[in-house]
Amino acid sequence: MIKAEKLSKSYNGIPAVHQLSFEVARGENLILLGTSGCGKTTTLRMINRLIEPDQGTVYLDGKDIREGEPETLRRKIGYVLQNHGLFPHYTVAENVEIVPRLLKWNTKQVQARTEELFGKLGLDLSLLKKHPAALSGGQQQRVGLARALMADPPVLLMDEPFGALDSITRIGIRKEFLELDELQKKTIIMVTHDIQEAFEMGDRICLMDKGRIMQLGSPEQLLFEPANDFVKEFLKQQHLHLELKVLKVRGRSAWNMMDELGSEALRNLLNDYKS
Ligand SMILES: Nc1ncnc2c1ncn2[C@@H]1O[C@H](COP(=O)(O)OP(=O)(O)O)[C@@H](O)[C@H]1O
Ligand SMILES: [Mg+2]
């Protein structure tokens, strides 16, 4: 569904993203994971044509995104900005209407879709008249998501969507997210610096450092077949916790998985559990 080919972008001669290539299959959740400044946002914005790469190409459904109209891209790709990114001087209604207006929907269409999405996201319609500052963090986050979902785009890009929330709200919303039927069939690229979040939400994880990919693979692969010392170090502190998460999230028989992976750590862990 999405193919990034050798994307590079420099600022003042310093590479922010260097020769980045990856593919995302239809319906897949890819997580861009890495510390602040490693090039995650820049990558996301190049996929959305908010930033033009110095080099490289992005294909959406096999087509170079530079060839289509920007409106087509807005319809196909929803974008949840870092820190929800709501316009403070717009009401909630005005915020969620941005893309529909661009696409020239009539008032009835806008209203129907807004009501549908607010219902699904557990947002009260009375919020529509308010400004973002009057909303709680969780509500702002949901409105940011609603805005991105208005035109029902097949692709969703999310930049640290839970970043502005306190840790308790965050865990709850993450769970809601995973269960939301609007998101089930979407192709999603999500940016985070939170390792636990990446392991909970990603079908595959792209671990980045200094604008380059350190490893791209399933959570299991990153954990049990780290490609290099960077990956090992990055996951080291939380390794045990992540192993448990992988077991829980995948819902597979631990014994089958142990067979497949032959992981010493996992075997020890399970022995601890049995005794
Ligand atoms: N508009 C810009 N001008 C100059 N430098 C930038 C700009 N945007 C990003 N950078 C730099 O590029 C690097 C990657 O930034 P970014 O993609 O925002 O990282 P991340 O989202 O992973 O925190 C950082 O070093 C950042 O300072
Ligand atoms: Mg960022």
Image: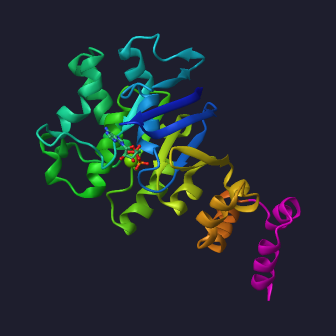
Count of marks, rendered view: 0
The single residue placed furthest to the bottom in the displayed view is 275
Q: Position of residue 23 (x, y in %)?
A: 63, 32
Q: Position of residue 103 (x, y in %)?
A: 30, 16
The answer to whether residue 160 is above or below residue 103 is: below
Q: How is the image coloured?
A: rainbow
The reply to whether residue 141 is visible in this rendering is yes
Quick one: 160 or 180, which is closer to the camera?
A: 160
Residue occupying image coordinates x 61% and y 38%: 28
Q: Quadrant of residue 56?
A: top right
The answer to whether residue 13 is above or below residue 139 is: above
Horizontal side, residue 185 vs residue 126: left or right: right
Range of magenta residues: 252-275
258 within the magenta span = yes
Horizontal side, residue 98 vs residue 217: left or right: left
Q: Position of residue 213 (x, y in %)?
A: 60, 45
Where does the N terminus fall, quadrant-wise? top right
Is most of the magenta stretch helix, strand or loop? Answer: helix
The answer to whether residue 100 is above or below residue 205 is: above
